[in-house]
Amino acid sequence: MVSSPITDLLKNQLPLEQETLELSENVRYGLVLVDIINGFCTIGAGPLAPAEHNQQMSDMINEAERLARLFCEKKWPIMAFIDSHHPDVPEHPYPPHCLAGSEESNLVSALRWLEEESSVTIRRKDCYDGFIGSIQNDGSNVFVDWVKSNKIESLLVVGVCTDICVLDFVCSTLSAKTRGFLSPLNDVVVYSNGCATFDFPVEVAQTSKHGFAHPQEIMHHMGLYMAKERGAKIVSSVLARGP
Ligand SMILES: [Zn+2]
């Protein structure tokens, strides 16, 4: 976290101890990529995309790509959620974004190759929460079926936004796990350096007609903290064992 008086205060009052995840050949993992798409992550790609280079965002993409390549090499399952909206169905309080069929609603260029991978499941969703967004018309849930058919024991979650779509998905998944819908899932792991959120500082928000303050470092920390409150493991590094 970038240091400032406010973030130092936050770290003191809401200390977040992070672990290391060492991937084991004896555990069945699933990787969930949340909304790593142009509309949220590619500079200038839309109303909710970063306007300029953002270190947290580019670190997130690099780590997501590293893990995606590792999982694909091992043929471990990956699920990619992609925000995708019908133009007539707004998602308050945000302006129209990531319309179905638009470039905004595609994986970032560093991850576009995943579309061709057999171990990747892509789920387009028209709401914040990928768990809710996985419910189909017949009542079945694509994400639940993916966990069960792959017998996933440990879920590794990366993507955007730490405090919005990542958090919502983690919260729903942990509640569903408690209710026994996700057996054999044991762990939901959020990788902090594989997550990012957007930056809309209070100074900018006060001069804008649209939106409310959303300082990046604070909201990223809060998102991770709230995920931990629900029972997620928060890790600051993910290490792969050699072959
Ligand atoms: Zn959306």
Image (cartoon, rainbow, N blue to C red):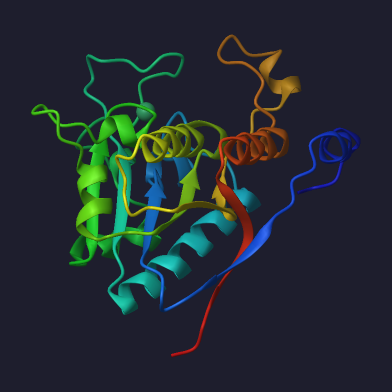
Residue 31 image position (x, y, % from top left)? 38, 58
Who's the residue at 69% across and 30% down the image? 215
Q: Position of residue 15 (x, y in %)?
A: 80, 42
| Residue 38, above or below 91 | below
Decide which of 241, 53 is in the foreground and name it.
Answer: 241
Which residue is situated farthest in the right direction here? 5
- The percent coordinates of residue 74 (x first, y second) are 33, 78
- Write down the quadrant of residue 73 in the picture: bottom left
Instruction: Report the residue at 24% width, 36% height from top.
Output: 134
54 to the left or right of 95:
right
Q: Quadrant of residue 87?
A: top left
Query: In the image, ligand 1 is in what quadrant?
Result: top left
Residue 26 horizontal/vertical position (percent) = 41, 76
| Residue 158 vs residue 44, the one in the foreground | 158
On the picture, is 30 further left or further right than 238?
Answer: left
Residue at coordinates 41% horizontally, 18% vertically from top-left? 95
